[in-house]
Amino acid sequence: MGARVLIVEDNAMNRELMDYLLRAFGFETLTAVDGRIALDIARRERLDLILCDIQMPEMDGIEFARLAKADPELRSVPLVAVTAFAMVGDRERMMGHGFDGYISKPLEPLSFIEAVNQLLPTSLRRQEDAAGSVPLEASTAPAQAPSILVVDDSPMNLQLKRDLLQPHGYEVLTALTPTHGLRIARDRLPALIISDVGMSEGSGFDFIRAVKADPVLRDIPFIFLSSTHWNDASRVLGLELGAVRYLLRPMEPALLLAEIEASMHP
């Protein structure tokens, strides 16, 4: 297991994004919605790094930093401000409040992981590249890489797939709905389709039915990647409908890349 990181953030989307990214890249995470809860967690858990928002209810990041740095058991844990503030002097102001580092929002996934890695003690830093175990410059994807269509109703998840796949040479096509995905598939004929299962405008199961009913699209390998439909019935149905893989996220980026390669080159 990688370094243990406490995420202190009241905004659910930002908290989930950081949690997803860190766990996907091998870190162990704990989360808190404000400084008071975070302080309780920090005092009972062994932590290697704390990522802390500034503006939060109950106890904000500034007060949390003051109390954490006054605690003999916590003061040595690196404390990093993660904030949307972007004014000149903000970094210095955060350091003056006791923070050891500063990461600005909005978060760009690969840059965020690289920044976290650099803020950890040397012995805890991940040695592989942030995109997985294969260095970006050593990607084995062909020069004229095939395109991959990703269908998911979460813009955040689409961005994560782009950030994972594009550095390895793939062209990434994205759609927020199965209807849009079907149009893109017919227009571009991707080499692989990756789809969520539960979406707000149509399910992944209906999407694969439409793909497999189209003579032009039916032979395109299809992967389901879901964070919600973990039950055996969904997995069995997905495979029966023609998916070559039914994967659950979060998962290690290197493992997802390996599954993609295996699906495209069985």
Image (cartoon, rainbow, N blue to C red):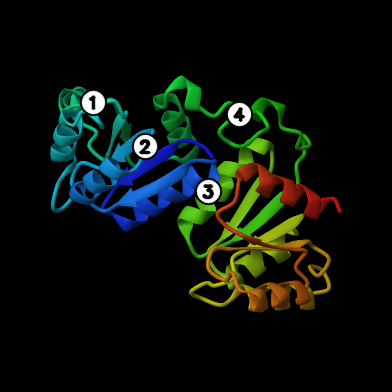
* Residue drawn at the location 84% of the way across and 50% of the way down: 265
Residue 74, above or below 43:
above
The residue that label 4 is drawn on is 128
Q: Which of the marked residues, 1 or 4, is nearer the chain's N terminus?
A: 1
Query: Residue 91 — which label?
Result: 1
* Residue drawn at the location 59% of the way across and 43% of the way down: 164
Query: Residue 103 — which label?
Result: none
Q: Which structural element holds mark 3?
A: helix
The residue that label 2 is drawn on is 47
Residue 261, percent across and down?
A: 77, 47
Q: Residues within 10 Å of mark 1 (few under 14, many from 20)?
A: some
* Residue drawn at the location 65% of the way across and 34% of the way down: 133
- Give the Cα separation between the discs numbered 2 and 4: 22 Å
Residue 255, percent across and down?
A: 68, 46
150 vs 9, nearest the viewer: 9
The residue type indicated by label 3 comes to: Leu
